[in-house]
Amino acid sequence: MLQQTQVERVVPLFERFIARFPSFAALAAAPQADVVRAWKGLGYNSRAVRLHRLAREVNERLSGVLPRDEAELRSLPGVGPYTARAIRAFVFGDDVIAPDVNVRRVVERTQFGLEWPVRRPTRDIDAAGAELVPTGRAFDFNSALMDLGAALCTARAPKCLLCPLQRNCAAAPVDAAQLAALARLHAPARGPQASRPFEETTRYLRGRVIDRLRELAPGERISLLDLRGSLAEALPDRDPATFEAIVRTLTGEGLVEEGECGLRLAE
């Protein structure tokens, strides 16, 4: 849930979700559509599908027990390198670094400084971070670095004078002009969606389609024409071909099911 979503937004939805699905067995037994309905408010609904598939695999293949081994974790749906290490650090207390964007930024600056004009390879940053984890304190250490990166060692305006690591930081004090130039130099290419208002993006349209299908009663379906008509006010400028392409994509991802009687959330 925390992938690409802020903590304050996640916490109440997490508590509601866990109350409804308190175990892998409960989540695995639920229809996928119910899981997607319970995911409302979080966005990136494909995460709900992957989590549901993960629960079923853990329940069926691993006797309902989440594995501790990193390779086994990464074999599960939706679990990549970061998620696997975060589970190891925060669930099992293993002495590993959970390299999210904030943690990597703090490690890179404190250990390597601001290298110009080349960025340090990610593998070097992760290796350096792994060496810093104090024995038995992975939970606290990773939490601290995440908070430090979010509050003080920010991407664009680091507050070096307030940072407790200032004396041991290879980058401090960060030169704002150099930081801005480095950010521009290494900024990822922006696609056509990035320059549009959110309400005009594909992601917004996907969310409105899923929200409308969430409103259907279990087993109820809606035709593509009626679905588009019911969203006409929210999406006044969307042509039919674009709308249909989005629905086809959601169907291909396993979020939406299409039958002779219309569309619904996939069960």
Image: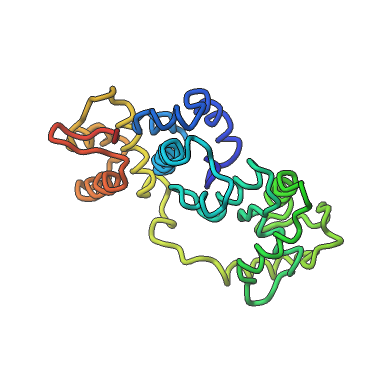
The residue under the point 76% across, 63% down is 110
Q: Nearer the viewer, residue 201 or 7?
A: 7
The residue under the point 45% across, 63% down is 190
Q: Position of residue 48 (x, y in %)?
A: 42, 39
Q: Position of residue 197 (x, y in %)?
A: 42, 49
Q: Is residue 16 above or below residue 120?
A: above
Q: Is residue 164 left or right of residue 53?
A: right
Q: Is residue 193 above or below residue 198?
A: below
Whether residue 162 is visible, yes or no, is: yes
Q: Nearer the viewer, residue 40 or 129?
A: 129
- Residue placed furthest toward the right: 167
Q: Is residue 247 left or right of residue 44?
A: left
Quadrant that contains the C terminus:
top left
Q: Is residue 192 above or below residue 114?
A: above
Q: Quadrant of residue 43?
A: top left
Whether residue 43 is visible, yes or no, is: no
Q: Position of residue 220 (x, y in %)?
A: 23, 25
- Residue placed furthest toward the bottom: 117
Q: Is residue 66 above or below residue 191?
A: above
The residue under the point 70% across, 59% down is 130
